[in-house]
Image: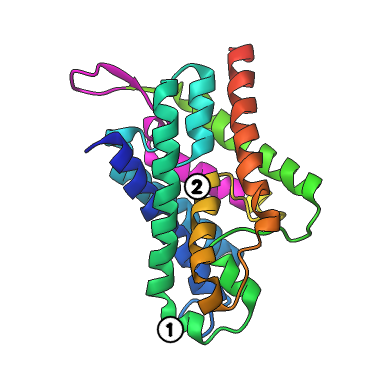
């Protein structure tokens, strides 16, 4: 499978499973309505597991522009591949968001709360304070990317002519990454909803923009820059810190 296609499909699958659990918890008349934060963080962790298992051998399963950028800054990923990876991830996020809408369309129709519907696509803070929100997204992403680096070194040898190919999430194995994302959600997710991934937020937020009139809710672009900029800064800090320490 082409690496860019793998990033596109993997991110779409990640968003489908991850935002799908948010829809299950937040929308009216679902079987999982009001089941809570533990359900959301657990399912998001295993959404990462599923997506990494599916795409790790083909692209390294970055599935996150902050991981891709961090690996490039660290020197473990070719800069010329960064734009293609990020574009594939964002488009995958759009597709994942649209499928979540189609899957839960009947439940969107019986849900009046605009915030509940918006949460099925994108993150928003519990308390809106941009500097604090940005800080939280930066720190959450530093933890994510740093731990990936320290566990894996960001490299894996593939059994083909490519030799040693620098990759990201896939190189540490799917389950440890799922546990890492679960821990971040439980410990650090309560302030902003722990986007820690620009594609996971930006892509579905674009999907929501396409559906906003139908759903009668706003994509809230006034906040949308935080879960894009924060994780990207966090990925760079993690890479610089790793290179300095190691």
Q: Residue at x 44, y 56 (%)?
A: 94
Residue furthest to the left in view is 160
Asked if residue 217 can be seen in this view, the reply is yes
The spot of residue 197 in percent (x, y) is: 54, 44
Q: The N terminus is located in which quarter?
A: top left
Q: Position of residue 164 (x, y in %)?
A: 30, 17
- Using the image as rendered, state which of residue 109 and residue 21 is in the foreground: 109
User: Pointer 2: residues within 10 angstroms few (<14), some, or many (20+)?
Assistant: many
Q: Do the CB atoms of the residues marked 2 and 1 lie less than 8 Å apart? A: no
User: At numbered mark 2, what does the secondary structure look like: helix, strand or loop?
Assistant: helix
The reply to whether residue 169 is visible in this rendering is no
Crowd rating for badge 1 (residues with CA inside 10 Å; few <14, some 14–19, many 20+): some
Q: Is residue 194 above or below residue 139?
A: below
Report the span colored magenta: 157-185
Figure check: 201 above or below 81:
below
Disc assigned to residue 31: none
Circle 2 sits on which residue? 199
Where disc 1 sits, the SS reads: helix
Q: Is residue 109 left or right of residue 187?
A: left
Q: Along the polypeptide, which appears first: circle 2 or circle 1?
A: 1
Q: Is residue 51 left or right of residue 42?
A: left
Instruction: Name the residue located 69 percent from the left edge and 55 percent from the top edge.
Output: 223
Q: Nearer the viewer, residue 77 or 219?
A: 219
Q: Which residue is mark 1?
A: 106
Figure quadrant of residue 152: top left
- What is the x, y in percent for residue 38? 57, 62
């Amino acid at each position: 499978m082409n690496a860019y296609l793998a990033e596109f499909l993997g991110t779409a699958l990640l968003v489908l499973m991850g935002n799908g659990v948010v829809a299950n918890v937040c929308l009216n008349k679902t079987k999982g309505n009001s089941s809570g934060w533990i359900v959301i963080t657990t399912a998001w962790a295993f959404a990462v597991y599923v997506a990494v298992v599916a795409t790790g051998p083909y692209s390294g399963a970055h599935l996150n522009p902050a991981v891709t950028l961090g690996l490039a800054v660290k020197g473990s990923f070719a800069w010329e591949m960064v734009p293609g990876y990020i574009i594939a991830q964002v488009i995958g996020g759009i597709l994942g968001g649209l499928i979540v809408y189609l899957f839960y369309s009947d439940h969107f129709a019986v849900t009046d709360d605009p915030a509940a519907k918006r949460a099925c696509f994108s993150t928003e803070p519990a308390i809106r304070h941009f500097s604090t929100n940005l800080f939280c997204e930066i720190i959450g992403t530093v933890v994510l990317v740093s731990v990936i680096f320290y566990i894996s070194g960001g490299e894996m040898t593939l059994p083909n002519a490519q030799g040693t190919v620098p990759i990201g999430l896939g190189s540490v194995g799917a389950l440890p990454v799922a546990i890492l994302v679960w821990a971040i959600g439980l410990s650090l997710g309560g302030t902003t909803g722990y986007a820690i991934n620009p594609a996971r937020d930006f892509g579905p937020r674009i999907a929501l923009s396409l559906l906003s009139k139908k759903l009668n809710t706003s994509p809230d672009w006034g906040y949308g820059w935080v879960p894009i900029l924060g994780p990207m800064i966090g990925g760079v800090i993690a890479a610089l810190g790793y290179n300095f320490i190691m």
